Image (tube, rainbow, N blue to C red):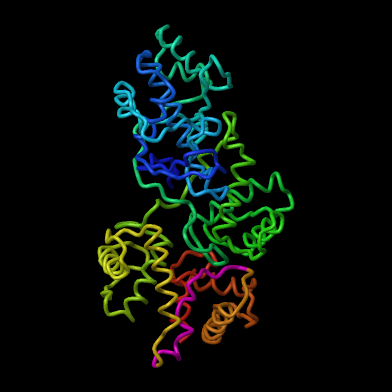
Amino acid sequence: MAIRSPIIPTVITVHLGTPDETAKNVTVPFDEYIKNVASGEIYPNWPIDAIKANVLAEISFALNRVYNEWYPSKGYNFDITSSSVYDQSFGENRQFFETISQVVDEYFNNYIVKEDQVQPLFAQYCDGRVTKCDGLSQWGSVTLANQGKNPLEILKNYYGNDIKIIYNAPVEENIASYPGFPVELGTSGDFVRMIKTQLNRIGRNYPAIPAITDDSIYFTVETENAVKKFQEIFNLQVTGIVDKTTWYKIKYLYNAVKNISNLYSEGISEDEATVLFGNKLQLGDTGSYINTLNYYLNVIAYFDPDIPFLNLNSDTFTENTRQMVIAFQNKYDITATGEVTANTWRALKEAYKQTISKVPTDCLCNVNEFYPGRYLLKDMAGEDIINLQKFLYLICEKKQSIPGVIVNGTYDSLTERSVKAIQANNGLEVNGVVGPTTWNKIVELSK
């Protein structure tokens, strides 16, 4: 497992005004943004350790806004404002001081955190003469530097002894947390687990939201019920589907109850930020994501002559997988890296959906054998479950070792027992979840 750690974004979008003020947005390289802010707020003739401490505070403040999507979660289309009342002072076309630029070049990919938290510290600060605050005093940092304090000692003086500096964070393109498609019943992914974590925390302040007891990557009926109650409470359309509006409303409420935009935030712990997979699927990866990826590629390639139909291992991202991904990316005008990021995954899901909706006439008799494109889970209902139960019924008639099922359209306990028995008998993970590999095995055994 990995920690969803903050990155240093290559660029940051600044709103040139207060949040609701009519003003343009400018997108600038992140290091230039910090040089701009620092050149407007501190002096180049200050002791070098005071400059370093202030730059670290300014970096951490900005990263806190970016990491928690503070403004996007409120419906704005920028990362931060230029207003010192809300954020940090940014001036378009401001000249940079050479001394400050040199410090930023050295420090721009470092930031401050609390020792038990993941998100960059919301490092409040003020000048310390005209204005006072709970955080760093800019003029006070000069006094401490003149006393021989180093940057970390200066920062600990204001933010507490339980802070540390994260050095050499990766510099990457910032990708919005919303996956780009509605998250609903039968969806799987780390983003599902994130939704569950955030809803459960919000539920501590809003107990009408039912607790989600399952912390897997699957969007279950239990998750759907919690989403519906959340949507009802906060006057959203009650669908049980996490579209972009619901996603960022959850994000906004999560930030609010955790008091993220505060020096004394409850913070995000490592457990909350842990993800099962990274931001992309690549050569050598294994697991359920790869099962689904390889299945999608196989079906798309079977009907699309532009995608080579290569032998794919069911649960491993092989060189063949990479070659098929490259061919897919080339066809759909996606940068051909051979790695599956959010953009490629969205396109694959849509291409698979379109493929099975346009199956040629000579294959229509077998159309129900195609994986329905979502995980089938306990308590789900509908046509997909009926098809599953029909296949299971055929198997049960042939194999007495498989428990019987009733074709009623509800994924009940009998259905789950049959699925688990098939998984156990065929060396599959015994979890009762019907993904592509289990679906294929069930269809095969039914014939």
Which quarter of the picture shows residue 387? bottom right
View extreme (right): residue: 208
> Does the stretch in magenta take in 369?
yes
Count every numbered label the image shows and give the total: 0
When the figure is inspected, residue 88 is found, relative to residue 419, above or below; the finding is above
Which quarter of the picture shows residue 330? bottom left
Q: Is residue 1 shown left or right of residue 385?
A: left
> Residue 353, image x and y in percent?
44, 75
When the figure is inspected, residue 233 is found, relative to residue 140, above or below; the finding is below
> Residue 333, image x and y in percent?
30, 66
> Going 48% across and 18% down the picture, which residue do you hit?
138
Q: Is residue 405 shown left or right of residue 447?
A: right
Which quarter of the picture shows residue 380? bottom right
> Going 32% across and 57% down the picture, which residue do you hit?
282
> Going 51% across and 38% down the picture, which residue do you hit?
17
View extreme (top): residue: 147
Magenta stretch bounds: 362-378
> Residue 96, image x and y in percent?
33, 27
